[in-house]
């Protein structure tokens, strides 16, 4: 479907996504902030790490399976929360949730998704929820109650957006939320009929324009409208007290997403979190931020056995997953790699991305002499 058979790696999927999506939307997904240093560094840092191969270990029978928060899964990955999935593919979050379930890994639904939480819960599988605390807290707490009732198994509180990111490319290409209709945007969309008819038209003909459907009533603004006030804006005053309070409210696994400093990792665990996600938000927030993979070893040392460390930002190859595991992560979140997949072919595209990552991880393990993921340790990485 949609040329997936010609996509041999995540970079191929990225190029196919670029062809299908209007430029403004593709760049919103693909690019970083300011000079895009941290976006490039996420990749460069992975590429700098070399693996020391091991030989004659009989790795003919290998498994990428692991256990995460007490639950078996097929590989040490989960899908990261990404708000515009529903803009790339009709009900793109459903496509991601189904692909994750089929692959045997968790899916993380973001606060700002365009598909109702209840619909995602119906998919089944392992589901996590990502929370941005809103300015008007009672709205956030009501949302949290729904997420608890629906049985989501982990809550990821994203804490790395203390200020508005400076996405200069969006200012240049005219794409920002809400989308302002313009001649340029109209031309951009008209030149991408696959997206126009396959995604936008399907919304218009079924549920109406894509909107923030999980917001409280009065704030479910469609993509062309601003909310009436900033009650559902991300609360920039969030502190560790909020994590302590969420710990009391949330009965299951609690993770703090967006940690790069070992002291912050310690504070997260002290505040009651079960673990942290080492992340620089895929280079989308702070352009001077350290690459996640470079920050990982110190965070893993700081957390030790007191919690679980996950990592995201820059995962494009199965060997990246092995490197993250070697440096202290228990699993990784797959970000844009899965988004490019749904942009190209919905669920089938996301499944293709996940399968490529799984197969590459499996091969890496073979070359590195590892029969299972527990055998991946720091010795895997060349000094
Ligand atoms: C288009 C896009 C939207 C995102 N939206 C969210 C979000 O709503 N909440 C969140 O915590 N992280 C969000 N992220 C960050 C991802 O969860 C993840 O940290 C990042 O994509 C990992 O980097 P990678 O894309 O290089 O794999 C978003 C990322 C992208 C690319």
Image (tube, rainbow, N blue to C red):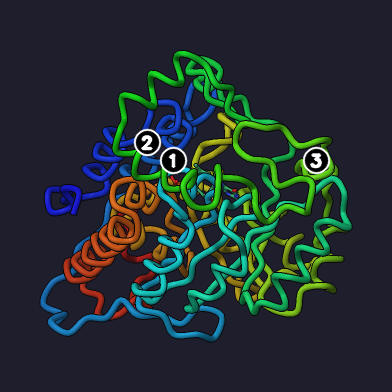
Q: Residues within 10 Å of mark 2 (few under 14, many from 20)?
A: some
Pointer 1 residue = 200
Label 1 near ligand 1 (CB < 8 Å): no
Q: Is residue 190 above or below residue 196?
A: above
Residue sitting at x 64%, y 68%: 275
**Would you say the residues marked 1 and 2 are in contact, meaning their CB atoms lie under 8 Å apart?**
yes
Q: Nearer the viewer, mark 1 or mark 3?
A: 1
Q: Is residue 124 above or below residue 380?
A: below
Q: Earlier in the sequence, mark 3 or mark 2?
A: 2
Pointer 2 residue = 196
Residue 274: give x, y in percent of width and height: 67, 73
Pointer 3 residue = 236
Quick check: can you spot residue 294?
A: no
Q: Is residue 362 above or below residue 236?
A: below
Q: CA distance from mark 3 to mark 2?
A: 35 Å
Q: Earlier in the sequence, mark 1 or mark 3?
A: 1
Residue sitting at x 31%, y 24%: 191
Query: Where is residue 104, by image quadrant?
Result: bottom left
Residue 150: give x, y in percent of width and height: 66, 77
Pick the front one: 190 or 333: 190
Query: Where is residue 234, by image quadrant?
Result: top right
Q: Secondary structure at mark 2?
A: helix
Q: Residues within 10 Å of mark 1 (few under 14, many from 20)?
A: many
Q: Secondary structure at mark 3?
A: loop
Pick the front one: 245 or 206: 206
């Amino acid at each position: 479907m949609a040329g997936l058979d010609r996509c041999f790696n995540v970079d191929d999927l990225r190029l196919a996504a670029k062809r299908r999506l209007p430029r403004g939307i593709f760049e919103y997904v693909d690019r970083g902030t300011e000079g895009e240093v941290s976006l490039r560094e996420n990749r460069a840092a992975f590429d700098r790490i070399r693996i020391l191969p091991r030989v004659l270990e009989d790795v003919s029978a290998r498994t990428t399976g692991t256990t995460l928060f007490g639950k078996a899964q097929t590989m040490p990955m989960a899908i990261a929360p990404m708000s515009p999935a529903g803009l790339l593919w009709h009900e793109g979050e459903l496509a991601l949730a189904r692909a994750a379930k089929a692959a045997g890994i968790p899916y993380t639904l973001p606060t700002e998704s365009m598909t109702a939480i209840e619909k995602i819960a119906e998919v089944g599988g392992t589901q996590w929820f990502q929370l941005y605390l809103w300015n008007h807290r009672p709205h956030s707490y009501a949302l949290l109650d729904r997420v608890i009732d629906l049985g989501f198994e982990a809550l990821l509180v994203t804490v790395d957006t203390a200020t508005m990111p400076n996405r200069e490319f969006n200012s240049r290409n005219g794409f920002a939320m809400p989308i302002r209709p313009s001649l340029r945007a109209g031309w951009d969309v008209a030149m991408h009929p696959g997206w126009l008819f396959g995604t936008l038209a399907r919304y218009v003909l079924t549920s109406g324009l894509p909107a923030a459907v999980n917001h409280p009533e009065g704030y479910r603004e469609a993509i062309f409208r601003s909310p009436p006030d900033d009650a559902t804006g991300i609360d920039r005053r969030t502190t560790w007290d909020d994590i302590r309070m969420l710990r009391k409210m949330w009965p299951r696994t609690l993770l703090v997403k967006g940690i790069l400093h070992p002291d912050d990792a310690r504070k997260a665990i002290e505040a009651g979190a079960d673990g942290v996600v080492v992340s620089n938000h895929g280079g989308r927030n702070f352009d001077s931020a350290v690459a996640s993979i470079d920050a990982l070893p110190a965070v893993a040392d700081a957390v030790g056995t007191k919690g679980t460390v996950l990592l995201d930002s820059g995962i494009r190859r199965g060997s990246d997953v092995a490197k993250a595991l070697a440096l202290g992560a228990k699993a990784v979140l797959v970000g844009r790699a899965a988004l490019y997949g749904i942009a190209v072919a919905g669920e089938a595209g996301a499944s293709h991305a996940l399968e490529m990552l799984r197969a590459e991880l499996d091969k890496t393990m073979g070359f590195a002499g590892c029969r299972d993921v527990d055998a991946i340790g720091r010795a895997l990485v060349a000094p």
